[in-house]
Amino acid sequence: MNFLEEKILSDGTIKAGNILKIDNFLNHQIDIDIMRQIAYELKRRFKGVTINKVLTIEASGIAIATMLGNLYDVPVVFAKKSETANSTDDKYISQAYSFTHKKTNKVFVSKPYLHTTDRVLVVDDFMADGEAVHALIDLVHQAGGEVVGIGIAVEKGQQKGGRMLREEGYRLESIAIIEEMDCETQSIRFREQPAQELTNTLLVLKS
């Protein structure tokens, strides 16, 4: 079992509707040590891959992306979900349905921040159906850049996002992949990842 799975088990709560609540360390209150470990682990997994930009979507992916950008010493870009007074009309636009918020968001990146020469690592905190990641991929492709990898902190393996992206040929690395979770028993089963010698047993989050 790796550090993120252990943290999920100790601090996470499963809510009705297949919702894993870990906002006390990942995406509301941020545990800097966990973010640092996520960034180092993703960089380790993408060892040997040339990356010159990190791309995520606001807001929860920004912390991980910033840590990674620091390690790679490359710019970090995040797709915005809402227009602001200083938003430019010259931008790449895509759409993403949010599993968490049950709505479709229009997301965009201003054109000066994505280029044909970019080799992009796409990152996010959670992935369920892969809508946000596909929107980010679309933005990179609109700019003529290349997605060289996708790094996710927590993947819901029982949903279609990860399977679709792997079938499409993308290199996807998820630190914790959830295969099964139960709200009543507060139990979770992670997908076995042989390279890290993880277990595939049913584990209880907390009493």
Image: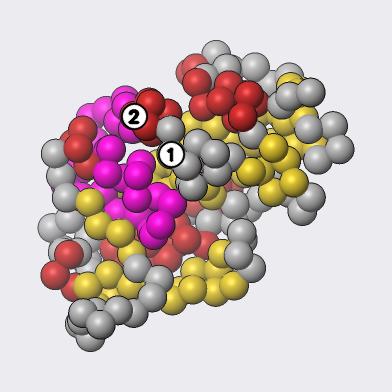
Q: Is residue 105 above or below residue 113?
A: below
At 55% across and 74% down in the image, what residue appears?
104
At 58% across and 21% down in the image, what residue appears?
6
**In the image, which disc is placed on residue 30?**
1
Left or right, 85 with respect to 19, comes to left
Q: Quadrant of the N terminus?
A: top right
Q: Quadrant of residue 5?
A: top right
Left or right, 191 with respect to 152, comes to right
Task: Please name which of the two marks, 2 or 1, marks the residue nearer to the observer.
Answer: 1
Q: What's the amino acid at mark 2?
A: Arg
Where residue 153 sits in the image (x, y, percent)?
A: 47, 38
Earlier along the polypeptide chain: callout 2 or callout 1? 1
Farthest top residue? 197
- Binning the other alpha carbons within 10 Å of mark 1 as few (below 14), some (14 to 19) or many (20 upward) gives some
Where residue 94 sits in the image (x, y, percent)?
A: 40, 74
User: Magenta segment, which residues?
Assistant: 39-68
- Queried whether the magenta region covers residue 78, the answer comes back as no
- Binning the other alpha carbons within 10 Å of mark 2 as few (below 14), some (14 to 19) or many (20 upward) gives some
118 vs 53, nearest the viewer: 53
Q: Which residue is mark 2?
A: 36
Where residue 78 sits in the image (x, y, percent)?
A: 30, 59
Where residue 180 sits in the image (x, y, percent)?
A: 74, 36
Dot 2: element: helix
Query: Do the residues under discs 2 and 1 have CB atoms within 8 angstroms?
Result: no
Q: Quadrant of residue 150?
A: top left
Q: CA distance from mark 2 to mark 1?
A: 11 Å
